[in-house]
Image (tube, rainbow, N blue to C red):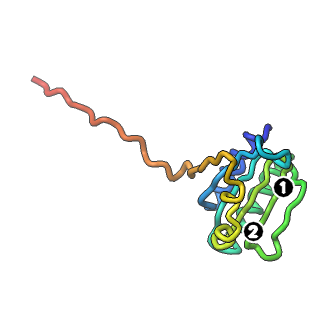
Amino acid sequence: MNSTQLSKKITNLIFEKKGYDVKILDLRKLTTMTDYFVICSADSDTQVKAIADEVDKSLRDEGIKNWHKEGYQALSWVLIDYVDVIVHVFKKEAREFYNLEKLWGDAPLKEVTDPALKPPVKRKPRTVKKQE
């Protein structure tokens, strides 16, 4: 699995635990540190932990182990490093304070929406022919 596929997989895992305001920062042209940041928000310590645990466990079950993780003590910002993709799970207030999107403002940013929340496709009304 390449880093682009991994970042997309991580966003789906985040949505499974109701993470929101999910963004992918493409850092490939800016640094050799990593390819992508996947950033999301949560409303509570419990949700931050649930999202981070879901990402870590699901990827580990597929044989993808993290290189490093931190932030489990305070649970306001959990970072999980998969080398080519770094996951940032923030409580809303911490995300506003650290503002990684602004710090890495030169990076192309992709907002990801939960596929379960996409509006239904609008269809043209069918016309019914009258029987004569």
SS of the residue under disc 2: strand
Classify mark 1: residues with Cα within 10 Å, few (<14), some (14-19) or many (20+).
some
Give the position of the N terminus as an image quadrant.
top right
Q: Position of residue 79 (x, y in %)?
A: 79, 62
| Residue 77: assigned label | 2
**As shown in the figure, which amino acid type bears the numbered disc 2?**
Trp
Q: Is residue 74 above or below residue 121?
A: below
Kind of residue sitting beneath label 1: Asp
The residue lying toward the viewer, choosing from 129 and 105, is 105
Q: From this viewpoint, which residue is outermost toward the front?
A: 106
Question: Which residue is at a point 79% across and 37% down the rendered structure image?
Answer: 2
Expressed as whole percent of the image width and height from the top left, the position of residue 118 reads 49, 49
| Depth order, front residue of 52/76 | 76
Q: How far apart are marks 1 and 2 (CA)?
A: 13 Å
Q: Position of residue 116 (x, y in %)?
A: 53, 51
- Look at the image and tell me in which quarter the C terminus lies: top left
| Residue at image coords 22%, 31% | 127
Q: Along the line of sight, which residue is nearer the eye, 28 or 72?
A: 28
Query: Could you say where residue 75 lies in the image, as x and y percent from the top left?
Result: 76, 73
| Residue plotted at (81% across, 69% down) | 71
Residue position for label 1: 81
For mark 2, does the 10 Å Cα neighbourhood hold few (<14), some (14 to 19), or many (20 or more) residues?
many
